[in-house]
Image (cartoon, rainbow, N blue to C red):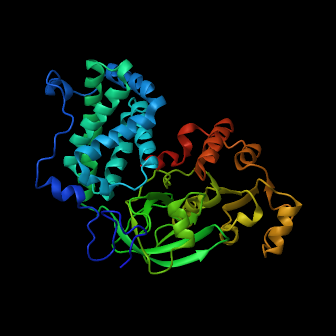
């Protein structure tokens, strides 16, 4: 049995007898009537609220969010306070520290409001949220009371732009949002568990702050190269973090991830410095749209910054497995210093085997000192002329144009944003630039 770091906290994710973490709300909700929560006022007809949102409703939603956004931290804190007040048993389903959770809620609201004009994209985004929320123990019955608490919080902090029409707009939009999420969750429940338990079978340290970990899930786990999942550790219950798969699906079913310990990163630090083979982690469902279309013969341009090289490596493996179909794959692998290019050896070996593959390391702090340090550390492949100095987005843009390429970006959020803008200026159409920066919201 793995005991959590804080044994006093309720509903922790035990991996042995007494694993009650997902039952806190679900079990009680089936056996009792919830205490009074905010309820819709009687003058709002249920029939009106059940109608699809109109363009006017969307404008009201956006206007009210603009008022709430400057005080989003207080509004979301009030929302969760209402939930925990009226449904105290669900507190065990959330992490002890709620700051990240509060921020994610408001970003998700903004995402839904800003993309309301793109029904297909919004539906795909909300479906992923619905499927992902199963791992928290979320049930269909939870959506209605959560909606009432949300509207009550928005009414309190959006007072200057809140009226009956705005409330009706929110009820229509929330009904649409919850319906999509519920249907996605119920559909996923017919074919997959809400989470997988996975035993850590390999832990390889790659420098002081990076580890490559491999796990064996307890049930078949189907995913695509380029996708990511969420991981929960036994030391930080209810805290889930996104990690990309570092290989294409393997015959043995093992899953590999690259993890960098970051400052104040509870999960990443635990995985890099505390986890050992035999530990049991939890996995959410696979997600992400950064996948290959094997029917498209266009050349590929892949940018991986730091541990963002993990999904790029998986994409290369998938191309090798299916055959390049005449296309080339250009990979730019960026880091601050040469000794942080921990995956370069493996990528060089792939480059030697596949003539369609080109690997270009980029170091933002390149110079004589960096090269000397890298060579002294046994980095024989780092020779004068092999490193491209500069910031990854700038180097890629300088070597353009990249017209006709399909671009895949993975790494820190700032790198992705800057790279996407640079590629757009270098001839890559916006619809041909793929990344999962938005995937963090899920």
Q: Answer above or below: position of 65 versus 435.
A: above
Residue at figure coordinates x 60%, y 51% from the top left: 412
Residue situated furthest right in the rendering: 368
Question: Residue 37, percent across and down?
Answer: 20, 38
Q: In this rendered view, identify the residue nearer to me: 133 or 21.
A: 21
Q: How many marks?
A: 0
Q: Answer above or below: position of 50 versus 161.
A: below
Residue at figure coordinates x 64%, y 67% from the top left: 209
Residue at figure coordinates x 36%, y 49% from the top left: 128
Quadrant of the rendering where the N terminus is positioned: bottom left
Splitting the image into 4 quarters, where does residue 418 fall? top right
Residue at figure coordinates x 40%, y 59% from the top left: 286
Splitting the image into 4 quarters, where does residue 7 fall? bottom left
Residue situated furthest front in the rendering: 8
Splitting the image into 4 quarters, where does residue 352 fall? bottom right
Question: Residue 109, percent across and down?
Answer: 39, 36
Q: In this rendered view, identify the residue nearer to me: 82 or 186.
A: 82
Question: Residue 312, percent across and down?
Answer: 58, 59
Question: Residue 15, percent across and down?
Answer: 33, 74
Asked if residue 12 shows in the view, the reply is yes
Q: Answer above or below: position of 371 versus 217.
A: above
Asked if residue 247 shows in the view, the reply is no
Left or right placement of residue 144 versus residue 369 in this view: left
Q: In this rendered view, identify the residue nearer to me: 95 or 208.
A: 95
């Amino acid at each position: 049995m793995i005991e959590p770091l804080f044994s006093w906290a309720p509903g922790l994710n035990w991996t042995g007898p007494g694993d009650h973490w997902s039952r806190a709300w679900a079990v009680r909700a089936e056996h009792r009537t919830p205490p009074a929560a905010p309820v819709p006022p009687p003058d709002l007809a249920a029939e009106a609220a059940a109608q699809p949102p109109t363009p006017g409703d969307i404008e009201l939603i956006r206007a009210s969010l603009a008022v709430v956004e400057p005080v989003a931290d207080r509004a979301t804190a009030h929302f969760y306070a209402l939930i925990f007040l009226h449904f105290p048993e669900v507190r065990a389903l959330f992490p002890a520290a709620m700051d990240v959770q509060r921020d994610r809620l408001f970003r998700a609201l903004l995402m839904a409001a800003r993309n309301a004009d793109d029904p297909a994209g919004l539906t795909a985004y909300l479906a992923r949220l619905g499927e992902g929320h199963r791992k928290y123990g979320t049930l269909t019955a939870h959506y209605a009371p959560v909606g009432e608490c949300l509207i009550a919080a928005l009414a309190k902090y959006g007072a200057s732009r809140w009226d009956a029409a705005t409330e009706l707009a929110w009820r229509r939009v929330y009904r649409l949002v919850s319906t999509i999420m519920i249907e996605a969750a119920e559909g996923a429940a017919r074919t997959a568990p809400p989470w997988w338990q996975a035993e850590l079978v390999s832990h390889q340290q790659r420098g002081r702050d990076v580890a490559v970990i491999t796990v064996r899930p307890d049930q078949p786990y189907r995913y695509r190269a380029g996708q990511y999942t969420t991981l929960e550790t036994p030391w930080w219950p209810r805290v889930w973090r996104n990690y990309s798969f570092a290989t294409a699906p393997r015959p043995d079913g093992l899953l590999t991830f690259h993890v960098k310990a970051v400052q104040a990163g509870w999960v990443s630090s635990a995985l890099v410095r505390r986890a050992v083979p035999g530990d049991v982690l939890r996995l959410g469902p696979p997600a992400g749209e950064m996948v290959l279309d094997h029917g498209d013969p266009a050349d590929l341009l892949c940018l991986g910054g730091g541990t963002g090289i993990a999904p790029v490596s998986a994409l290369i493996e998938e191309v090798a497995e299916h055959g390049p179909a005449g296309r080339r794959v250009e990979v730019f692998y960026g880091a601050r210093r040469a000794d942080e290019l921990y995956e370069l050896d493996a990528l060089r070996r792939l480059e030697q085997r596949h003539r369609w593959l080109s690997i270009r390391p980029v170091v933002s702090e390149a110079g004589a000192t960096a090269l000397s340090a890298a060579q002294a550390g046994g980095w024989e492949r780092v020779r004068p002329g092999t490193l491209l100095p500069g910031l990854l987005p700038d180097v890629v843009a300088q070597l353009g144009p990249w017209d006709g390429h399909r671009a895949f970006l993975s790494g820190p959020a700032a790198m992705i944003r800057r790279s996407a803008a640079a590629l757009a200026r270098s001839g890559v159409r916006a619809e041909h630039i793929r990344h999962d920066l938005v995937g963090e919201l899920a």
